[in-house]
Image (cartoon, grey):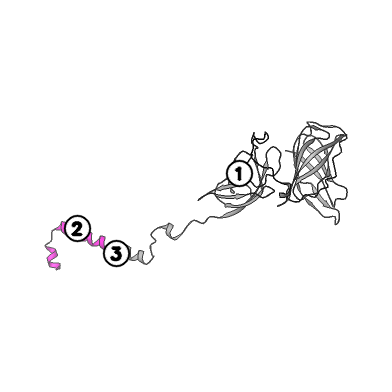
Amino acid sequence: MLQNLKNVPLLVKVLLLALVVVTGGYAGIEFLINRNLIPLSSTSTESASVEYENFNFYVEDKQESKPIPRVQVQIISDGPPTSDQTDNNGYLEIGIPKRKTVKIILSKDGYQRANYSVNLLTTPNTTKTFHLEPNSTASNGNSATTPESSSSTSTVTSSPAEKPIATGGTLTGKYVGKWLGNPTEKKLEDNSSNDIQVEIQLKNGSAGSKVGNIKYSRPYNPCYGDLILQSVKSGTLQLFENITSGNCISNGTTTIKLIGDDLIDYKWERSGSPVTISGSLTRQ
């Protein structure tokens, strides 16, 4: 047979050689694939793993700085959107991809829809506060929402018989603004103490009127309250504090004294209370 191949034209020899190479090469590749020595594609044998991390936030009324219960939350990342809801204190904990930007959409009857973007690579993983702006119709009777019952919020330790006593004075512009700090909460029974974040928002007003809001930030137990001006005397404000949400002691007295333009001395106390809170807050 080899003798016969000598008489075959050169062009035919080349074509026969190419056919042998192609056929043999295909068979070899098929052999390797059938034995999983060559994967068909990288995506068929491995998939990118997605790391998730917990992300915590509160939703507050932008005007009143109070928690908004039962806010509808939509989380958009890879795949279909997922839905959740804040609790009675406006709090929610969700798991989101650690290395991707996630869109969070907040909605609640009586409020404007709000969108937030979160990326844990650029956003410190601390509890955040998101805000919703009330609709312009929310206060004129056109809103279809029903006010949340006070029984749906956390227990508030208070005495309804106590009322703020206004003795005179006016809160002026030098106190107006947002103040934030970490004063010390001291327990009288064992003299133990810990720091607690306090945020106060003050506005102009006269004695007997509501002049601000206060927020105590504790893990999973924030408290919110109204501040009613009792008196202004020798540069010191005395405010009646009415807790409206959260498991904190209500009807205490908050005393504020301005120290410079951007620092106030803060103290909270109530007769018979097992705790006192004192420290300094700075202007924000």
- In x, y percent, where is residue 102? 56, 47
Which secondary structure lies at badge 1?
A: strand
Q: Amino acid at mark 1?
A: Leu
Question: Element under label 2?
Answer: helix
User: Which of marks 1 and 2 precedes in the sequence?
Assistant: 2
| Residue 3, above or below 81 | below
**Closest to the observer, 83 or 201:** 83
Judge the density around disc 2: few (<14), some (14-19), many (≥20) Cα neighbours within 10 Å.
few
> Which residues make up the magenta segment?
1-24
Count of marks placed on residues? 3
Q: Residue at the location (71% across, 46% down)?
A: 149
First in sequence, mark 3 or 2: give its number: 2
Q: Quadrant of residue 45?
A: bottom left
Magenta span has 11? yes
Give coordinates of residue 239: x percent, y percent.
Answer: 83, 39
Q: Which residue is mark 2?
A: 15
